[in-house]
């Protein structure tokens, strides 16, 4: 019950143990198309370019930025935690000019301040932000931010690593141009893959590049030659077949439950955790309207050794919860309720463990 990886469904682990086949095997090609279709469901998009990057969430982040930025181009990056900061660093390494708009950790991205930045930097080509900031447990308003990007003729790039499958996300309806996610959070597949989706506007920017992306591996033009749509299925790299089997199985689990039911389950288990936490006299760090149900930031009470509590839970309850990062180190615990780890039993176990640790 930390910030990810979450528990992996047994059927997903079983899928991972299936015999490995070749990455150009005709059966695998059929499998790839079906997997991409399931990803479209999870993202709520019709984007033809929707595929899993063969590397973790940070590679999805890098894929969006290296393809959509050319040297010297400006990008507004809203940062309210660890992962906004990572985007800024990657944009810099692309030779682009990141314009950071910083927010206090534990608060949401304020669309008004982003609008000011977009007005002051009319030459910016993109706006990037983290929808679900795992380092603080904060949800930002992706729909409003993407609308702002559109109004200022910028592409929107959205980090949905902790979002996908856990809370409402509607890529097409919200007009998101490029998005990346993770497998190890609310999808409950093993870590190591990053589903991404680019719409037509994003692909037009890729096609119009004057310089090739600095990363060969993450070059979307090369990736689509293997993953489609309508691709010749030319060898690009040896796909991680078994990890993809696992992701596909996790997406089947999501489809069986139904996306909205999954969002509802994450919300309900958060409500149950919240009432138990508050009954114990503990407090949440984030304002109610910005809280992520799948990542709960709980304030460490004065005088409590937060690491000792985590150690007690790990050793006595075989239960992991996360520590605070950066300016929140020592100040909060991060309790994940993601995917297969978002159940009433997990909530009960965590509350019992915390109560015992604090007694
Ligand atoms: C919001 C967010 N973005 C990006 C990442 C990076 O993902 P990964 O660690 O899989 O590279 C994470 C990982 O926790 C994350 O929570």
Image: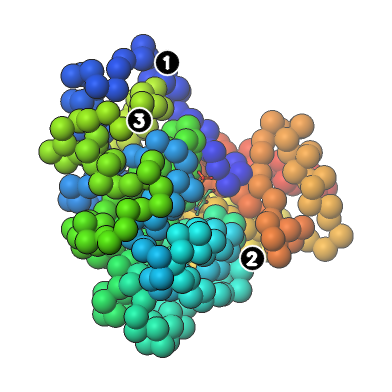
Q: Residue at 26% x, 76% y: name it.
A: 153
Where residue 206 sits in the image (x, y, percent)? 26, 57
Dividing the picture into quadrants, the one containing residue 324 is bottom right
* Disc 3 element: loop
For disc 2, the neighbor class at 10 Å (few under 14, some 14 to 19, many from 20) is: many
Residue bearing mark 1: 17
Q: What residue occupies the far right of the structure in this picture?
A: 303
Q: Please say whether residue 133 is visible from this viewpoint.
A: no
* Sooner in the amino-acid sequence: mark 2 or mark 3: 3
- State which tag comes first along the sequence, 1 or 3: 1
Image quadrant in which you'd find residue 102:
bottom right
Task: Return the disc, 1 or 2, that comes first in the chain's sequence.
Answer: 1
Placement of 319 over or under 30, stated as above or below: below
**Which colour scheme appears in the figure?**
rainbow
Any part of residue 47 in sight: yes
The image position of residue 210, as x and y in percent, is 27, 61
Residue under label 3, please give it: 237
């Amino acid at each position: 019950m930390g910030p990810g990886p979450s528990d992996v469904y047994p059927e997903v682990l079983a899928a991972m143990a299936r015999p490995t086949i070749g990455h150009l095997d005709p059966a695998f090609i059929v499998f790839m198309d079906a997997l991409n279709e399931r990803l479209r469901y999870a993202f709520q998009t019709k984007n033809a370019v929707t595929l899993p990057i063969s590397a973790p969430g940070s590679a999805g982040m890098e894929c969006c930025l290296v393809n959509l930025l050319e040297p010297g181009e400006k990008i507004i990056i809203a940062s309210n935690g660890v992962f906004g900061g990572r985007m800024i660093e990657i944009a810099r390494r692309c030779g682009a000019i990141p314009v950071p708009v910083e927010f206090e950790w534990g608060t949401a991205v304020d669309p008004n301040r982003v609008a000011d930045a977009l007005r002051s930097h009319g030459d910016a080509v993109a706006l990037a932000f983290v929808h679900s900031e795992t380092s603080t447990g904060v949800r930002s308003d992706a729909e409003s931010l993407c609308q702002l990007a559109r109004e200022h003729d910028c592409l929107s790039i959205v980090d949905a690593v902790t979002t996908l499958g856990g809370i409402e996300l509607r890529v097409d309806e919200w007009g998101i141009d490029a998005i990346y996610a993770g497998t190890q959070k609310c999808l409950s597949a093993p870590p190591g893959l990053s589903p991404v989706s680019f719409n037509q506007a994003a692909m037009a920017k890729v096609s119009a590049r004057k310089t090739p992306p600095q990363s060969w591996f993450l070059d979307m033009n090369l990736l689509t030659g293997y993953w489609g749509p309508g691709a010749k299925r030319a060898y690009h790299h040896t796909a991680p077949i078994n990890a993809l089997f696992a992701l596909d199985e996790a997406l089947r689990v999501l489809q069986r439950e139904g996306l909205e039911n999954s969002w509802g389950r994450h919300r309900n288990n958060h409500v149950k955790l919240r009432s138990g936490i508050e009954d114990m006299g503990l407090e949440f760090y984030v304002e109610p309207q910005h809280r992520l149900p799948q990542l709960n930031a709980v304030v460490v009470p004065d005088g409590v050794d937060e690491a000792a509590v985590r150690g007690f839970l790990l050793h006595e309850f075989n239960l992991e919860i996360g520590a605070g990062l950066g300016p929140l180190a020592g100040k909060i615990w991060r309790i994940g309720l993601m995917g297969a780890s978002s159940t009433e039993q997990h909530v009960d176990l965590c509350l019992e463990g915390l109560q015992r640790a604090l007694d």
